[in-house]
Amino acid sequence: MSVALLRRGAVYAFLSVAAFLSVFPFYWMAVGSTNQSPDIVRGKLGVGENLLVNFQHLMTQVDLPRVFGNSFLIAVISTFLTLAVSSFAGYGFEMFRSRIRERIFQLLLLLLSIPFAALMVPLFVMISRAQLNNTFTAVVLPGIASIFIVFYFRQATKAFPRELRDAARVDGLKEWQIFLFVYLPTMRSTYAAATIIVFMNAWNNYLWPLIVLQTPENKTITLVISTLTAAYTPDYGVILLATVLATAPTLVIFFVLQRQFVQGMLGAVK
Amino acid sequence: MTSLSLKGIRKSYGQLPVIKGVDLTVDSREFVVFVGPSGCGKSTLLRMIAGLESITAGDLEIGGKRMNDVDPSKRGIAMVFQSYALYPHMSVRDNMGFALRFAGKPKDEIARQVNEAARILELGPLLDRLPAQLSGGQRQRVAIGRAIVRHPDVFLFDEPLSNLDAELRVHMRIELARLHRELQATIIYVTHDQVEAMTLADKIVVLREGEVSQVGTPLQLYDDPDNLFVAGFIGSPKMNFLSGEVVDTGAGAATIALVNHGGVRLTKPLGGQLLQKGEMVTIGIRPEHFGVAGQGTDIALAVDVAEHLGSTTYVYAHGGGERLIIQREERHMGDTDAIAVSIPPEAALLFDSAGKRLR
């Protein structure tokens, strides 16, 4: 009895520490956005009264609507195109039999192991030659055919009943109509889960936009936050407020889609 | 309604042949059942008729037109799937009208057709529900309704009842028979359940390893099977098989000794079949055809268990290393360890060592 209790206590203690480590940075970020920079550095953990001042400072340093607009546009276009292309590919890989199908798929998975740092320079050269430097197209284009999302859709498509496709064929639908009118609505939760993943990646993307976006009017929120830290005396209150604002959209997307997200992660078709 | 014919139909996946030359004619308004063990190619054959699998060789004709390369939706068929294959995001009404919508039918026409099918299948109150809100039996009725609204020349059913529980299966079986009568439809139906085949079919096609083993009416297959496989497959409980040796031939008859039952002898008339002395054969006898002992062809068996079903009793017994099932009409067999039965020669069927029927 006491051993069981002890074990339980240990588990709770471990989980509490883990929960604290996960939640505390968020708490500190939120609280920090209401405090002055010196208070934050001193380690003040309570809510302050400096939120509006921080906001005013942020607005003077950054063209917030424009930066958010840029981030939003890039994230939305990326999400839409990535889902379209990658779900097409995932559907195709699973539905159409071919002798070389698995070979190609294995090759794609192998590509996942190449770090982005290795691709960065050749990619930049390609984008420059295509004269897409400093455009949103340059940010969006390399991520559209996401191998991870293709893989995710292929795995999810395994649960899509083949008889639904057969029934649709007998009902007179062409392949693209089956995709659009049967597959897509059936796989709603898979799309929801993928939307969260892709949107978050696109929204939080830092390295690639840093390379291809040069002029201030094209900068995204992640790039702007990094420039705030580069000041001679960084204002942590302003930085944390910017971070809170940058986190908000992904949280909203997550809470809107969370039910479908969980379903999508468990398997789309019951 | 339209007839359908298969001429030398073959299907291979790479080097592997799965359908090895099927010739078959399905008459208009006929209810034809493809039956066979799993892996015999019956579903593949049905999918080839539907156009969901390509035909490697041979000709498929529906209504006299060659259909090998015609799109599934233009073949004049409708199909009901084992898993129902209802579109999960659409109401029953939309599921049933989906094909008509894509065929460009006007809305009021679609509504009329859907309502008519709903009336036939008593689906009226369910039209606005989603498939997830229906029971298995209701889903199957919707799947059938989806087929009906298209007014196909030929209905194709792929094991439509195998996901239902036993009671519902019997109910839907009767429902299907009624529907066939009402719609005067040509139906091809695939099942591995020989009871379904026996009760529904005008004509049964028994398939085995990609080939037609025998075609006939249910009673033809039951009473007069062409081979050991059909004899064993059709009928529940199964036909009993006993090993025999030819001990005498001549005068249009052969005398067989039951080697595992003390050499009990049966004399069986044979028309034109040549048998050699010493040749091994198989005797087949249905459980209900055993006679009472004392006919001169008695065998003694040890009883394993007796199943009392009320109107009839099945006795599971063994003797000479062979397990047999005997059907008895007595309600109370009593507790007995041994039983003696006779084998009436006129009810016994004879098969050669290759499993071919000897008549």
Image (cartoon, coloured by chain):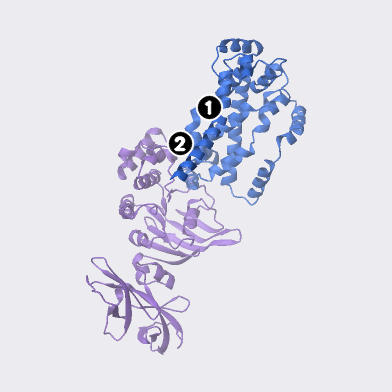
Chain colours: A blue, B purple
Query: Residue at (56%, 26%) from the top-left corner?
Result: A24
Q: Is residue B82 left or right of residue A98?
A: left
| Number of numbered discs overlaid on the protein picture | 2
Return the chain for callout 2: B
Residue B22 locus on image (x, y percent): 49, 63
B35, above or below A93, in the image? below
Distance of label 2 from label 1 (alpha carbons): 38 Å
In terms of depth relative to the viewer, which is nearer, A35 or B143? A35
Residue farthest front in this picture: A2
Residue B262 locus on image (x, y percent): 37, 87
Q: Which numbered marker is on residue A80?
A: none
Q: Is residue A102 left or right of residue B195?
A: right
* Residue placed under numbered mark 1 in the picture: A253
Return the chain for callout 1: A
Residue A69 locus on image (x, y percent): 61, 19
Residue A201 locus on image (x, y percent): 62, 30
Image-quadrant location for residue B330: bottom left
| Badge 1: residue crowd in 10 Å (few <14, some 14–19, many ≥20) | some
In terms of depth relative to the viewer, which is nearer, A132 or B103? A132
Amino acid, disc 2: Gly
| Badge 2: residue crowd in 10 Å (few <14, some 14–19, many ≥20) | few
Q: Is residue A231 left or right of residue A153?
A: right
Secondary structure, mark 1, is helix
Quadrant location of the C terminus of chain B?
A: bottom left
Secondary structure, mark 2, is loop
Query: Residue at (41%, 34%) from the top-left corner?
Result: B106
* Residue placed under numbered mark 2 in the picture: B104
Mark yes or no: residue B65 visible: no
